[in-house]
Image (cartoon, rainbow, N blue to C red):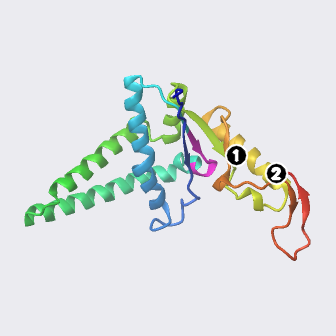
Amino acid sequence: MPPMNLILMLHTHLPYVLHHGRWPHGSDWLCEAAIDTYLPLVEVLRRLERRRTPLGLTVGFTPVLAGQLRHSSFHAELAAYFEQRLAACDEAYASQAEEGGPLVELVEFWRARLVRLRLLWHEIERDIPGEFQRLANAGLLELTGSAATHGFLPLLGRDESIALQLEVGWREHVRTFGERPYGCWLPECAYRPAGVWDPLPGISRAAERSG
C-alpha cells in the first residue's frame, strides 16, 4: 500500500458566555472546556515538542472563543473554578478517607490533575491562545480561523453579511494571533450550493446566489 498522510483538524468554539453567570451555561462552561480540552491539549503538545515529534495538526479557533480565553474576566473565573474544584476534591477525600471508601485513589488522581493543569496555566502566563501561537511558531501545528460570530452562513439573508462575517473573523484572528489564518472553518460545516435561494417558502426573497 502507498504511504498515507494523516492531517488532524481540531475545531474549537464556544458561544459568548462570560458575564452570563456561571452554571450551567455561563462561565463554568468555558472553564470546563479549558480544563478538560484546551489545557490538556497544550500539555500533550508541549510533551511532543520536547520529544521533537513531528505532527500534522491544525487547530481552529473562532474569534468568539479566542477573545474569551484572553479576557481578564475569564482569568478570574478560571482561577475561581480551580479553587472550587480543588475544594470539592478535598471534601471528597476527607469523606472517603474517614469512611474507608474505595474512591480515595480516584479523588487523588483528579486533585493531582487539577494542580498540574493550574500550574501549567500559570507557566503559559494564563494565555491559552498565546501558547497555541507559540506552538504554531515552533512548527507543532497550524492555526486556522472562522467566521466572526460562528454565524450559520447559508441562512444569512445578504451576501454582504457573509462577507462581513468572514472579513471580521479574518481580522480578529490576525489581531489575536499576529498572523493570517491558514484557512477558515465553515461554522457547523454548513455549505449552500449555488442557485435559487429560497430559505422560507412563501416569502418573496428568492434570488440567484453563489455557493
| Residue highlighted by disc 1 | 169
Q: Against 204, is 117 above or below?
A: above
Picture quadrant where residue 192 is located? bottom right
Q: Against 15, is 169 above or below?
A: above
Residue 83, horizontal then vertical, whole percent: 32, 55
Query: Marks 1 and 2, Cα distance to the nearest angstrom?
Result: 19 Å
Amino acid type at mark 1: Gly
Q: How crowded is mark 2: few (under 14 residues within 10 Å), some or many (20 or more)?
A: few
| Residue highlighted by disc 2 | 211
In this view of the protein, which residue sits in the foreground, 99 or 82? 99
Taking the image as shown, residue 85 lies to the left or right of residue 32, namely left
Q: Residue 8 carries which label?
A: none
Q: Is mark 1 on a helix, strand or loop?
A: helix
Magenta span of residues: 59-65
Residue in the image at 12% along x and 63% along y? 101
Residue in the image at 8% along x and 64% along y? 98
Mark 1 or mark 2, whichever is nearer to me: 2
Residue in the image at 90% along x and 66% along y? 206
Say whether residue 64 is magenta.
Answer: yes
